[in-house]
Amino acid sequence: MLTHVPWTAVPGLRHGFLDRSEPDASAELPMALARQVHGTRIALAERGARPEADGLVTAARGLGVGIVTADCVPVLLVDRGTRAVAAVHAGWRGAAGGVLEAAIADLRARFGSRPDDVEAVAGPAIGGCCYEIGPDVIAAFERRSGSTTAPALTTVNGRDHLDLRAAVRLLLAAAGVRAVAILGPCTACGGSYHSYRRDGSETGRQLSFVGWA
């Protein structure tokens, strides 16, 4: 079941907008960011470092982990018990390839977080209304996760569409995460959010981050 919640209901969650310049890591909370490559690597966040990865994890107080998106799904993970957090960039390639499961496994290996203790938020991203896909995308999900994400697919005017956040929710549930909230609307609808598909490479980015002050 999809749940829409305000960011104020989620501990540690903040969400904002960026132009095409680099994010200001000094805003609100010192922040670690990754060089995102649409892959599945998860890295431990370190101050001043920017590893090539599509997810960062930390349990350090006073350090946030963040990702930038403009249609892909920003996924923020929190374990209140261990104070471990993760920020994950989940485009279709990463989601199909296992980046979400890799983040859950990394939280468990490093900090002892059990999947059923992890809370997840999937932020604003392109919706099934606007995200037309080809058979290669469907095949990529099916190769690794079988029919798990089939409920996220719809047909609109004879063409396949994917609700990427619904696919993320289904994959997280299959990995044992029971609390998954969906935040915000489709990024490609209207002009309230940056959207690569709508505006091309000159668009800005949304910054989503999480951490314990």
Image: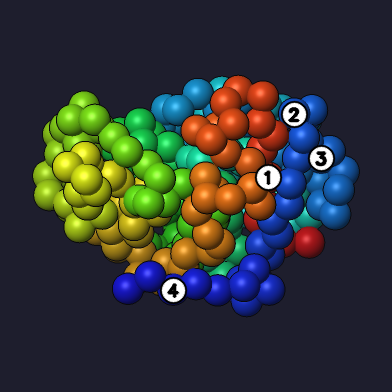
Question: Which residue corresponds to the image point at 56% horizontal and 62% vertical from the top-left?
Answer: 184
Q: Which label was assigned to residue 25?
A: 3
Give 213 or 2, whichever is nearer the viewer.
2
Q: Nearer the viewer, residue 23 or 130?
A: 130
- Classify mark 3: helix, strand or loop: loop
- Pointer 3 and pointer 1: residues touching (CB < 8 Å)? no
Query: The residue tagged with tag 1: helix, strand or loop?
Result: strand
- The residue pinned by badge 4 equals 3
Q: Which residue is mark 1?
A: 207
> x and y percent of residue 155 in the render?
20, 48
Q: Amino acid at mark 1?
A: Leu
Which quarter of the image is occupied by the N terminus?
bottom left
Q: Position of residue 79 (x, y in %)?
A: 52, 65
N-terminal of the pair, mark 1 or mark 4, is 4
6 to the left or right of 179 = right
Using the numbered discs, state the Cα–Cα distance from disc 3 to disc 1 in whole angstroms.
11 Å
Q: Amino acid at mark 4?
A: Thr
Mark toward the viewer: 4 or 3 = 4
Q: Residues within 10 Å of mark 4 (few under 14, many from 20)?
A: few
